[in-house]
Amino acid sequence: MPTVPAPLQVLLDHPSKHLEGTDIQLVLPIGRSLLNEVLDARPADTPVQELLLDPEANNLVNLHLGVKAPVLGSVRRKITFRPKGSVSFPNQPWLHFDITDGFKMFDKPIIKLMQGQIAERLPKGIELTSDHLRLHLPALLTSAGYQALVPLIKNLRLTSEANVLILQLHLKA
Amino acid sequence: MHPVQKHLFDTNFRDLSGTKLEGTIALSDELINLGILDFLQQLQKPDTDTPKAKSEAPAASSAMPNPADLLKMVTIEEVKYRTEAGRTMVDIKAGIK
């Protein structure tokens, strides 16, 4: 595991103190190959066999997913998401994605039946139903050890163009 | 090197093309001083690792980005340095082509 340089660690531990007065807007387009490099670097214990993102035009993102699901066994799907709205703190902590396509005929009723089990198996902060995926950013940042960054994120929005996922972020300390 | 970092270096940050940054970055004096200390410590490190560093030089140099190529990709419209009590402020408007 790479060690974090001491100044960066201090910054991550107490960002409000060391960044006080910061007010910055960032637009970060992340190309498809970099995006998938980031996904490839996920922790080894992630319960996912295959994970690929394919951003499209018109704000649609294809997720190629391979998982071992209860009852169904090994499942591979291409699921299409549409990012919706933005995260703002403290009022709107969820990053919301509508699922527009990808589940097969029996997927939706099975997901509805097994909603409780799915919720138990997913990491805290990730909510999946047959219609949407929601990420609770404070919970995810907290579980990654970056809880102190949460109050700094004034606005965060994801959108998609062909081969590029665009992150718009407003940080204020 | 982290695979994501290696990918960024290998591709000269091409996958972040179109990035825009605008606003004020403020850093505390304590953080700046920690950074200076860390930088000085890094400068002293190669003395003890010289033989190892030399033997790894060919592989490392192929992974590192060319600073001149990187600078060509960056557009800076505004940088204003100033200080306030206990902190350094940089007003910046910049991006990656």
Image (cartoon, coloured by chain):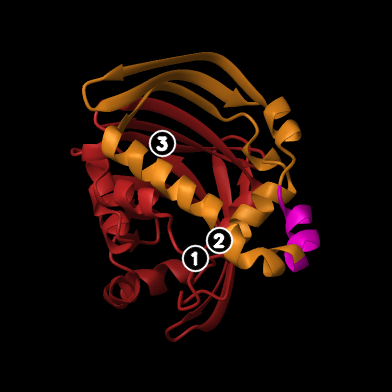
Chain colours: A red, B orange
- The residue lying at 43 percent from left, 58 percent from top is A4
Q: Which amino acid does label 2 sit on?
A: Leu
Q: Is residue B46 left or right of residue B59?
A: left
Q: How many marks?
A: 3
Mark sitting on residue A2? 1
Q: How crowded is mark 3: few (under 14 residues within 10 Å), some or many (20 or more)?
A: some
Q: Do the residues labelled 1 and 2 touch (CB within 8 Å)?
A: no
Reply yes or no: does residue B62 show up in magenta. Answer: yes
Query: In this figure, which residue is indicated by the disc labeled 2?
Result: A39
With respect to residue B55, does A114 lie above or below?
A: below
- The label shown at residue A157 is 3
* Chain identity of mark 3: A
Using the image as rendered, state which of residue A168 and residue B36 is in the foreground.
Answer: B36
**Label 2, residues with CA under 10 Å away: few <14, some 14-19, many ≥20:** some
Q: Is residue A171 above or below residue A11?
A: above
Q: Distance between the residues labelled 2 and 3?
A: 19 Å
Residue segment shown in magenta: B55-64
